Amino acid sequence: MTGLFTVYGCTVAIGVLAAILVFLRETKKASLTEQAGDMALCLIPAGLIGARILYVLFRLPFYWMIGLEHIFYLREGGFLLYGAVAGVILAAVGLCRRRGLPVASVLDALAIPGLICIAICRLGEGSAGEGLGSWVEDEALAVFPFAVPNLYGEPQWSVFLLEAAAALVIALILHARKGTCTGKRLWTGLAMVAACQIVFESLRMDSVLKIGFVRVSQVISAVILLGIVLAGHLLRSDKNRAVHGAIGIVLLATVVGILEWALEKTQISNWIIYGVMSIAAFAMLQIALRALRGKTVL
């Protein structure tokens, strides 16, 4: 597609529409239907603005060099998933406070719609040449869905499909856990997404933001898990577990950073590195989920 419409743009629109429809269904279950429609319309721009602001903050020197007016050229690209998440959460909390709605219930209602939107948007990334991994050397694996051809017809790992599948699996897990305490669904889903992204971001070979050899989204993922651990334990006044959990997250995040360095500076097999990284990410997730247990509502 050309002009005002692109495949990726249309995919994002479909993802947003799907999220709205599911959100309306989720709020109906929580008896919040009356204000769900206009709330959803308010959350869409909040997510877009948040995604753009976070990206610009990490690339501010670049925009300062080429001209700050480019910050508003949205068609040039430049959005971060976690910025969209933060924008939606902050807007939802603000709207709930203003209208006297239960914050925990509304945030819970946003979890599955958000994951569905992420999954659909990830599928659209492939059309924009994003979400691709390294080049596939094994001809047996150089086929869909394991790999897709890039702009030059060369097969690369289809990481965007893996990310989309993970988001859908997490949504199904949350849907199945109907007994999850109110206020925990969103944070549980976010913890799962963060743990997955620690590995997925490392697999991506596209225009990801980096701080040295560590990817920005990996750092944000670790910070999210750390925040969940601290909040979960401190709200129950369990300082010892908060400290122990935080130390565990920091140590495992350090391991991930060392593995990122090893990917670029050593000859260790990538399969071994990614295997260890997956174990570290899973351990971080377990620490975060342990902090979410109990009746504390974040």
Image: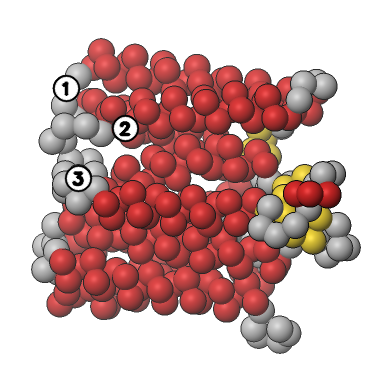
Q: Residue 125 shows which numbered tag?
A: none
Residue that badge 2 annotates: 289
Image mark count: 3
Q: Residue 180 shows which numbered tag?
A: 3
Q: Amino acid at mark 3?
A: Thr
Q: Amino acid at mark 1?
A: Ser
Provide the secondary structure element on which disc 2 rests. Answer: helix
Q: Residue 28 location in percent, x, y?
A: 17, 71
Residue 156 in view: no
**How did the renderer colour the structure?**
secondary structure
Residue at image x 42%, y 77%? 17
Find residue 99 and report its image quarter.
bottom left
Provide the secondary structure element on which disc 1 rests. Answer: loop
How would you rate the neighbour count of disc 2 (Cα within 10 Å): few for under 14, some for 14-19, many for 20 or more? many
Classify residue 27 as left or right of residue 123.
left
Q: Amino acid at mark 2?
A: Leu
